[in-house]
Image: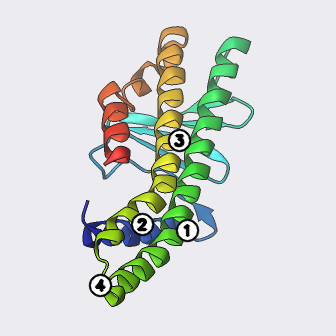
Amino acid sequence: MSYQRMIGLLAMTALIAGCGKESGSTNVISFRSGSMVNGGITLRNDEVTLHVQSTPDAVINAAGDLSIDQRSTTVSAAQRALLQDYYHNVLAVNEHGILTGKAGAAIAGQAIKSVVKGIASGDTDSIDKDINAKSRKVTQEALKICRDLANIKTAQDSLAVQLAAFKPYAGIIKADNLTDCTSDSKN
């Protein structure tokens, strides 16, 4: 990967890490407008909200309570545990997203220094090597997001089987989303 492309990617990572604050609440993951999934997941005010077109929103809280269209849904202990797992993995995506952004921001400055140093010394071959070595931390953090998404999908799939009311939300994260995440994180 060329150092110019790496610097651009790192700058974008830093910018993305700084986004998401909206009037005191945090918009953690929102796939609504992206091409990643056909629905959306948001975390706001300590609640995970699932959005699927032509379906009422479903809300999950930390206790594993589920409400659909603002009505509480009765769940068993096993279903509650799955809902809590779903919720906690959404929080993990948020945390790992922040760490990825911070890692990207930290190495963006280092990358610029490496470029300046390489050009000034005439040793431009060392630029890619130095930047690639430093970018591994960003890749490691990004892969954690992919694992978190895989955990959400596992909970999503189990909930779809065990809880009829959850079935409309079972397609939010698809298997190819996980493949894309892993492949994008490594590139």
- Disc 1 target residue: 21
The answer to which of marks 3 and 2 sits earlier in the sequence is 2
- Disc 4 target residue: 122
Labels 3 and 2 touching (C-beta < 8 A): no
The answer to which of marks 2 and 1 sits earlier in the sequence is 1
Please, what secondary structure does the residue beneath circle 3 have? helix
Is residue 72 visible in the rendered image? The answer is: no
Give left or right: position of 177 versus 167: left
Q: Label 1 neighbourhood size at 10 Å, few (<14), some (14-19), many (20+)?
A: few
Three-letter code, disc 2: Asp
Q: Label 4 neighbourhood size at 10 Å, few (<14), some (14-19), many (20+)?
A: few
Mark identifier at residue 144: 3
Q: Which of marks 4 and 1 is in front?
A: 4
The answer to which of marks 4 and 1 sits earlier in the sequence is 1
- Disc 2 target residue: 130
Name the one closer to the observer, 53 or 63. 63
Name the one closer to the observer, 118 or 158. 118
